[in-house]
Amino acid sequence: MFTQPFIGASYLLRGFFILFKPGIRGFVILPMLINLIVFSLLIWLGIYQFDILMEYVMGNLPEWLQWLDWLLWPLFLIAFLLVGFTISLHLALLIAAPFNGVLSEAVERHLDPTSSLPVSSWSDVAKGVAPAIISEAGKIGYFIIRAIPLIVLFFIPLINIFAPAIWAIFSAWMLALEYSDYPLSNHGLLFKQSKVVVKEKRLVAFGFGGASMFCTLIPLINFFAMPAAVAGATIMYMEQFRDSPKLAITQSK
């Protein structure tokens, strides 16, 4: 049990290594460029908003808690990075959704040449843009409903000290669900069905999501994090979920 999160994290590392294999690297460039553009724009915007946020928080603290200034600054910097990068990533995932699905297909065919998945052309990608974005929008809606109460915690004195840790746990789990959905949806599962399958290996998935979130926060590496996580989630699907009885039951419904 204690090794399962580390096994999950290892799938992300394996995802990095497989990105530039023949038959896969051609599907990496567009998701990586989308990630680069979205993160660069939102980082630039975030730099200007951080001071405004801190002035608001410190201005609403009672005088007897002003001594927390030295503690709240680093905590809120971490929180700002966590929330900002998570939102940026979900926006990038929305835009890159059609390409991520095809990348997952390519990784699966590379690992298993006998896979039943069809070989998608760029015309297939174009046809799948609307369904992929609609599906991704549904996942973002699922994320937003749960994220709003957590964001409120950042504005409640004393409780906001623990908010970054709570957000980190939440984000790790959301990324595990998000990325695992690509290989599972390629096999006909809806997002609500994917959640059921992923929960069967909760600790493995959480370790993978935590590693994905961590890499998202590292400059330069974060530009490769999205395609690497898609590839890693596909490897995780093939080794952890493909032969799961719960997957077979879910597919039959």
Image (cartoon, rainbow, N blue to C red):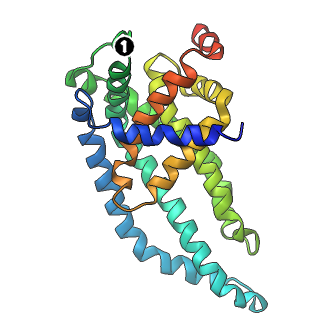
Helix, strand or loop at disc 1?
loop
Q: At which x and y percent is residue 191?
A: 55, 28
**Going 27% across and 30% down the picture, which residue do you hit?**
24
- Does the rendering let one see residue 161? yes
The residue that mark 1 highlights is 117
Q: Looking at the image, which residue is at 63% across and 60% down?
A: 151
Note whether 183 is above or below 58 in the view shown: above
Measured from the top left, where is residue 89 in percent x and y? Answer: 43, 50
The outermost residue toward the front is: 3
Q: Is residue 184 left or right of residue 98?
A: right
Location of the C terminus (image quadrant): top right
Residue at (27% x, 26% y) in the render: 125
In this rendering, position of residue 40 left or right of residue 52: left
Q: Amino acid at mark 1?
A: Leu
Front in this rendered view, residue 203 or 44: 203
- The answer to whether residue 94 of the structure is visible from this angle is no
Q: Residues within 10 Å of mark 1 (few under 14, many from 20)?
A: some
